[in-house]
Image (cartoon, rainbow, N blue to C red):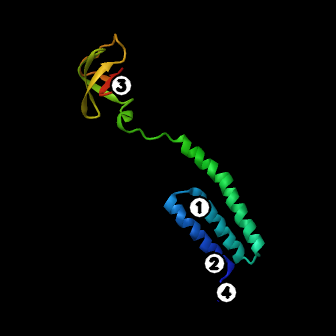
Amino acid sequence: MDIDAWVWWLIAAVGLGIPLVITAMPELGMFSVGAVAGAVTAGLGFGVVAQVIVFVVVSVALLAVVRPIAARHRAGQPGHASGVEALKGRQAVVLERVDAHGGRVKLAGEVWSARSYSADQVYEPGREVDVVDIDGATAVVL
């Protein structure tokens, strides 16, 4: 029994698609789409040379066009801050007077020691302040 060329191209597409799912390498997906294009070319009755050319052209075109777009999109998204980095920029409520020497604030549902960013600033209880930095276990507020 002789297997048609388009079946081999689909086997190649699946063979490239499985590692794509396992490794999350988008390049393999682009080659997989190229193999599907090769299968379509074979199904339309074109020869092996045309099939390989279509596979190469579609794969390279996807790599040249889609990959840079995806890279720009990924670079434009800010990373998700976690830990103390996630606390910077948040608001806190002063619980005990905060000055350059210390105080207490409620930040993210927890009580934190705090000090003012500026030596001459004093914040009274009840006031909302912005957290500009975390210095050890102390919130630096403004």
Residue 44 x/y as whole percent: 72, 76
Of the image marks 4 and 3, the number of the one nearer the N terminus: 4
Res 11 label: none
Identify the element where label 4 is drawn: loop
Res 130 label: 3
Q: CA distance from mark 4 to mark 3?
A: 73 Å
| Residue with the mark numbered 1 | 29
Q: CA distance from mark 2 to mark 3?
A: 63 Å
Q: Is residue 4 left or right of residue 22?
A: right
Q: Amino acid at mark 3?
A: Asp
Q: What residue appears at the point 34 percent right and 12 percent down from the top-left corner?
A: 119
The mark lying in front, picked from 1 and 3, is 1
| Residue with the mark numbered 4 | 2
| Residue with the mark numbered 2 | 7
Q: Is residue 60 left or right of residue 70?
A: right
Q: What residue appears at the point 25 percent right and 34 percent down from the top-left corner?
A: 109
- The answer to whether mark 1 and mark 4 are in CB contact below 8 A is no
The mark lying in front, picked from 2 and 3, is 2
Q: Does 119 sit above or below residue 113?
A: above
